[in-house]
Every structure is written in C-alpha cells, then in structure tokens.
Image (spheres, rainbow, N blue to C red):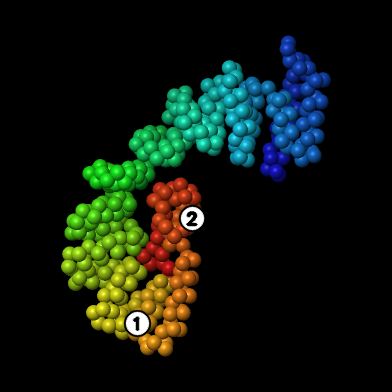
C-alpha cells in the first residue's frame, strides 16, 4: 500500500500539470471546469488511502499522448507487480490502440503487454507479441530473454536453443553453459522415449558446446553403464573430477559399481585413496572405510576414518565413525551408540544437500536449473568435496 501511495503522488502531479497545459480547451475536449473536480476527487481518494479509486480517476483523466505515455507504462508495470494483471493488460492494450504513438513507444507497449501475458500464463499471446517486438525493434534483448523463458516453460528446447543463440549475437555474451543444458534436456527427453541413439547425440552436442558440462558427462556415463560398457563408463565418470570436483560425490557410487563389475578392487582402492587425499572426499572416505572394514577389520577402518576427520571434520563422517563403533563394540554399548547415531542422522536429514551458488536456494535433491533464480548449472552439492559442515 505504501509503495502504491508514493507512486500515485507523481501521477497526481502529472494529472494536475496536464490540466494546466490545457486551460484553453480544443474542440471536443473537456474544459478546465469539468476536469478540476475530477482531479480533486482523485486527490481526496489518495489522501483517504483509497488508491484503487484514485487510480481509476487519474487514468481516466490522463489522455494518451506523447506526454503521458510513460505515465501509463509505469502504471501498467505497477499493476503487474501487484499481481493485478488484468488492469495492466487493459492499460497497455489501450496504449497500443492509439495511432499517435511513436515506433519506440509502440514497441515498448508491446513488450510490456507481452510481459503482462506471461504473468497471466498466456504464453502463446506473449510469444506472438515478443516476436512482433523483435520485428519492430530488431534484436531486442528483453524480448529475446522473455522468449527464452517461454520456451523453457513449454520445454520446447529446440526453440530455446535457437533463441539463446540469437541472444548471444545481440549481447555479445557467450551462453555455452545454458545451451549445453538445453541439449541435456533433449537427451533426457530422448531417454524417456527409449531413443538412446538420439540421447547420446544430444549429450555429445552438449559437450561440444560446453566441455565442462558435468550433467552431460554424467548422462553419458549412465548410458554407457546401462549398456553394459563399464570400462567406457568408468573412464567417462572420472572426467567429472576435471570438470568440477564438487560433483564427485554424485558419481562415486557409479564409479565403485563399475570397478566392482570389472573385478578391479585393487585399482578401486588406489583410486579412492587418491581422491580422498586430493579432495577430502566424503564419498570416497566412506567407500574406503567399508572396504577396510571387510578386509582388515573395524579397527583399521576406524583409524582411517579418524585420520580423515582430523583433516576434515564432517557430520556425515562422524556418523560413519559411529557406525564402525557399533559394529565393533559389545551389545550393551551398542544401544547408546545407536541412539547417538539416530540423533546425528536426524540432524543430517535437516541439512540441505544442495545449494545454489547464485541465490542460495537449498534443497535435498539436485536441480540442474535452480527453482529460485532459474540459473542453469548453479546448484551444487552443499558439502562440495571439502566443506566442514556436511
């Protein structure tokens, strides 16, 4: 309410200024005597904190011409921000219907009306208006971005790719990472339709556009592993370390599965030790502790986990250590340890597993497009490979 009142004060002033400019009425216009009562009526509504009625009065008073177009545009934007999309649409439609608008003013009104339609969920209408805006205004950046959003919502990834490429040309800014994510979306769609050939083609396109695309690498590794090609899959999964080591926990179970399927347990232990030393990786530490437990006993496994916790203390690491103590201690001590483990696990369940680097959105499942800020590839494992709060 306060924001609206502050905004309406200059609107009221603009209305009074407009009337002062027209003290000598032209043929067919209202004269000043007819207009001033409306002006004071609007002010009275404003003073009595009745902004909706004040808006109606001022909008009726403001004639749409080159001097008041900006005021109408601003009112429409305000309505849209308040969620009153119908009123915003009426104002912007009224502007577009006026023949006296300049090319710049008409294109701006088209853009704002398209944003109104987007807010109302009328994506087809919004798309047509943004395309008209581009025809009038050339490569309008705002319209291109809006079209990208529309095609993302509609999951029309081919159109989204084409529009992002036009946006790259308009801004001179490379958007390889976004385009790669779109190709990954196409790969996911192909997999849902059991078209592995098309899926692999889309994954390769994603990696050709953005060689650092972790999502594409994981998809490629998953398809190779599901096809029974564990040796190839293992090689692919290991590429994640070079792309972004924070995502190693996402592929570590698959890497271990590939090693076991190939019967290369010794190589697996060497690899896990290497990863644990290089990145303080929780996933590799837990895997190694399990291997040591079955090969050398709980005591050696506990010593290894304790060594890692001294280097990098984590909540999940403590849970792993308690699990080893439970396996090693006598039954009468187990009850207390189990209770401690359960409490620690409850604490861990309340923690976010993934966090967006841009807006801070957090959750317990990975999103390749952040639900908060809509950025692509910004959500990462919250503990990373070396955070002390996991």
For disc 2, the marked residue is 361
Residue 136 x %, y %: 47, 23
Image quadrant holding the N terminus, namely top right
- Quarter of the image for residue 241 reads bottom left
Q: In this picture, is 10 found above or below 254? A: above
- Please name the residue that numbered disc 1 is placed on: 327
Q: Residues within 10 Å of mark 1 (few under 14, many from 20)?
A: some
Element at label 2 = loop
| Residue most extreme to the top | 27
Mark 2, Cα crowd under 10 Å, few <14 / some 14-19 / many 20+, is some
Q: Is residue 31 left or right of residue 104?
A: right
Q: Nearer the viewer, mark 2 or mark 1?
A: 1
Query: Looking at the figure, which quarter contains the C terminus?
Result: bottom left
Task: Tell me residue 325's x, y (percent).
Answer: 37, 82
Q: Is residue 94 above or below residue 368?
A: above
Whole-number angstrom distance, CA of label 2 to CA of label 1 = 37 Å
Image check: 329 left or right of 30?
Answer: left
Labelled disc at residue 72: none
Q: Position of residue 244 (x, y in %)?
A: 33, 57
Helix, strand or loop at mark 1: helix
- Residue 331 shows in this picture: yes
Dots 2, 1 in contact, CB < 8 A: no
Compare residues 138 and 383 and report the one nearer the observer: 383
Residue at image location 24% in from the left, 55% down from the top? 226
Task: State the residue at coordinates (24%, 46%).
Answer: 196
Q: Mark 2 or mark 1: which comes first in sequence? A: 1
Identify the residue at horizontal 45%, vertical 37% (top origin). 150
Place of residue 212 in the rendered image (x, y in percent of width and height, measured from the top left): 31, 51
Does the rendering let one see residue 70? no
Q: Based on the displayed image, in which of its 4 quarters is residue 76 positioned?
A: top right
**Residue for point 69% across, 28% down:** 59
Residue 49, compared with residue 267, is above or below; it is: above
């Amino acid at each position: 309410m306060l924001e609206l009142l502050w905004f309406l004060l200059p609107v009221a002033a603009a209305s009074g200024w407009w009337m002062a400019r027209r003290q000598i009425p032209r043929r067919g216009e209202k004269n000043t005597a007819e207009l001033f009562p409306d002006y004071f009526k609007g002010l009275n509504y404003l003073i009595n904190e009745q902004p909706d009625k004040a808006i109606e009065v001022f909008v009726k008073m403001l004639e749409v011409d080159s001097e008041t177009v900006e005021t109408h545009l601003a009112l429409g934007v305000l309505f849209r921000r308040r969620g009153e999309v119908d009123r915003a649409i009426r104002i912007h439609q009224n502007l577009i219907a006026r023949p006296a608008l300049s090319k710049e003013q008409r294109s701006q009104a088209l853009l704002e009306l398209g944003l109104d339609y987007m807010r109302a969920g009328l994506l087809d209408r919004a798309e047509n208006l943004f395309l008209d805006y581009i025809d009038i205004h050339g490569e309008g950046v705002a319209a291109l971005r809006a079209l990208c959003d529309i095609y993302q919502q509609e999951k029309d990834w081919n159109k989204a790719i084409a529009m992002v490429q036009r946006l790259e040309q308009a801004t001179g800014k490379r958007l390889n990472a976004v385009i790669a994510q779109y190709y990954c979306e196409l790969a996911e769609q192909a997999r849902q339709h059991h078209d592995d050939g098309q899926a692999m083609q889309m994954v390769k396109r994603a990696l050709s556009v953005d060689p650092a695309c972790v999502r594409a690498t994981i998809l490629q590794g998953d398809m190779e592993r599901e096809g029974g090609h564990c040796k190839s899959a293992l090689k692919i999964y290991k590429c994640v370390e070079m792309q972004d080591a924070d995502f190693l926990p996402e592929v570590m179970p698959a890497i271990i599965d590939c090693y076991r399927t190939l019967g290369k347990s010794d190589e697996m232990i060497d690899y896990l030790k290497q990863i644990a030393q290089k990145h303080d990786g929780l996933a590799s530490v837990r895997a190694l502790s399990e291997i040591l437990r079955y090969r050398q006993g709980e005591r050696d496994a506990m010593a290894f986990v304790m060594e890692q916790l001294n280097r990098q203390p984590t909540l999940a690491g403590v849970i792993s250590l308690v699990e080893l103590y439970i396996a090693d201690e006598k039954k009468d001590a187990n009850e207390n340890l189990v209770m401690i483990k359960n409490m620690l696990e409850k604490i861990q369940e309340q923690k976010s597993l993934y966090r967006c680097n841009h807006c801070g959105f957090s959750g317990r499942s990975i999103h390749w497009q952040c639900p908060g800020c809509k950025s692509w590839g910004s959500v990462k494992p919250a503990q990373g490979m070396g955070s002390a709060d996991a």
